[in-house]
Image (tube, rainbow, N blue to C red):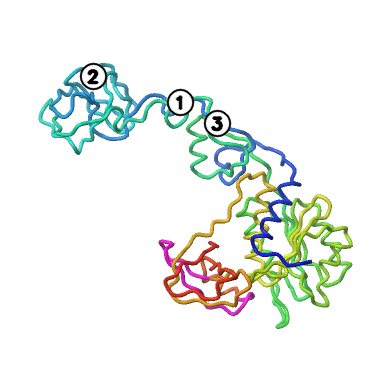
Amino acid sequence: MAPLTFAEARGRVMAEVRDARRIPTAEEVGLDRAAGRVLAEAVAADRDSPVVARSVRDGYAVRAVDLPGELLVIGEVRAGERFTGTVGAGQAVEIMTGAPIPAGADAVVMVEHTRRAGGRVQTDRSAEPNQFINPKGCEATAGEVVLRVGKRLDYSDVAMLAAFGRSSVKVYARPLVAIIATGDEIVEVDQKPEEFQIRNSNARSLEAQVVRAGGVPLVLPVARDTVEHTREIIGRGLAADLLLLSGGVSAGKYDVVEEVLAGLGAEFFFDRVLIQPGQPLVFGRVGRTFFFGLPGNPSSTMVTFEVFARAALELLAGQEEITLPMPLARLTREFRHRAGLTRFLPARLSADGGEVTPVAWHGSGDVPALTRANAFLVADPDRPEYASGELIRVLMK
């Protein structure tokens, strides 16, 4: 099977999962539990927003035709109140941000552009009709769909649900994601490893990544390096919506994951991607369950989940818009890598996101270097050298 480029592999993941996914079941949750969930119903505005024309500045509600000039102040209106009179020729009403526009007025002049003397206000500025006024329904009209099915809700969406009177909302159930670490060298986190053993950190990092991506993690026992035990544990994992395997997908004598999956009738979509870390990445499906065989080195596991498995999980959760933001940042020093692979290497992004510095590391197993990083450099396969000050893509952790 020929290896795929980064873009080809990500495109294949999204195409296969999107074509085969089932609509998840829906459940109703309160607004306190809605953030991060995927919307299972369209939400419409229950009224115009704003319901009445309102001011977007502190100042004076006036008739545009009367400016510039001196006006008689006939009252005041605050947010939450309504002025009962009408603004006539040569008159003004003092108005606060968010307050309804009084009848007769068609513009607002900012308080900073006026001079008040007793009961009169003067400005030497002209005004255009509708200046500093949000007309009725300009944000949304009653019955207009403001949130669509498949949207992952963020804090602004929760605010809009509340603004339109929704105390609860239907969302899709979170996908169940089985996580299996493989290898005789792995011991549990609370055990003291021998010098030839390692603790099961990959399952825990994947658990955290799954939760962040909107899934429900199920960490299964470590699959040992025999066909029989690996088959037993994988069989349990195939009951989930998505199966993540860490390790056992290289070409070593005791890497038995692909053999077991093939014996279970797996369809393999690819088994190698031209990236580093994470070249020996396997993606496929057994029955209706998609699986990823992620390379076992920690950074390989983390990176391949973020750029491939996360997209599959989001699609299985019912999310429609799947993105992988990789903004540009300016290198603080020169950077070189061997051409031919798309590389994801640990880095520190500046607080303002404008500059990025590579973090020294000692290969895919260097977890301490990963904890010092807050991003990954994304080096293009056809660009072996980047000068200091050049722009390079960045993937946030």
How far apart are labels 1 and 3 at the CA level? 12 Å
Residue highlighted by disc 3: 145
Whichever of labels 1 and 2 marks the residue nearer the N terminus, that label is: 1
Secondary structure, mark 1, is loop
Residue in view at x 60 percent, y 54 percent: 212
Which residue bears the numbered disc 2? 87
* Label 2 – label 3 distance at C-alpha: 35 Å
Q: Quadrant of the N terminus?
A: bottom right
Whether 364 is among the magenta residues is: yes
Mark 1 nearby-residue class (10 Å; few <14, some 14–19, many ≥20): some
The C terminus appears in which quarter of the rendering?
Answer: bottom right
Q: Is residue 281 magenta?
A: no
Residue 308 percent across, percent down from the top left: 66, 59
Along the horizontal axis of the image, is 213 left or right of 355? Answer: right
- SS class of the residue under badge 3? strand
Q: Residue 21: x, y in percent?
A: 74, 46
Residue 305's quadrant in the figure?
bottom right
Q: Assess disc 3: are there few (<14), some (14-19) or many (≥20) residues with their C-alpha within 10 Å of its C-alpha.
A: few
How far across and how far down the image is residue 334, in percent?
46, 77
Seen from the viewer's position, the closer of residues 117 and 114 is 114
The residue where tag 1 is placed is: 48
Q: Earlier in the sequence, mark 1 or mark 3?
A: 1
Query: Does the magenta stretch mainly form a helix, a strand or a loop?
Result: loop
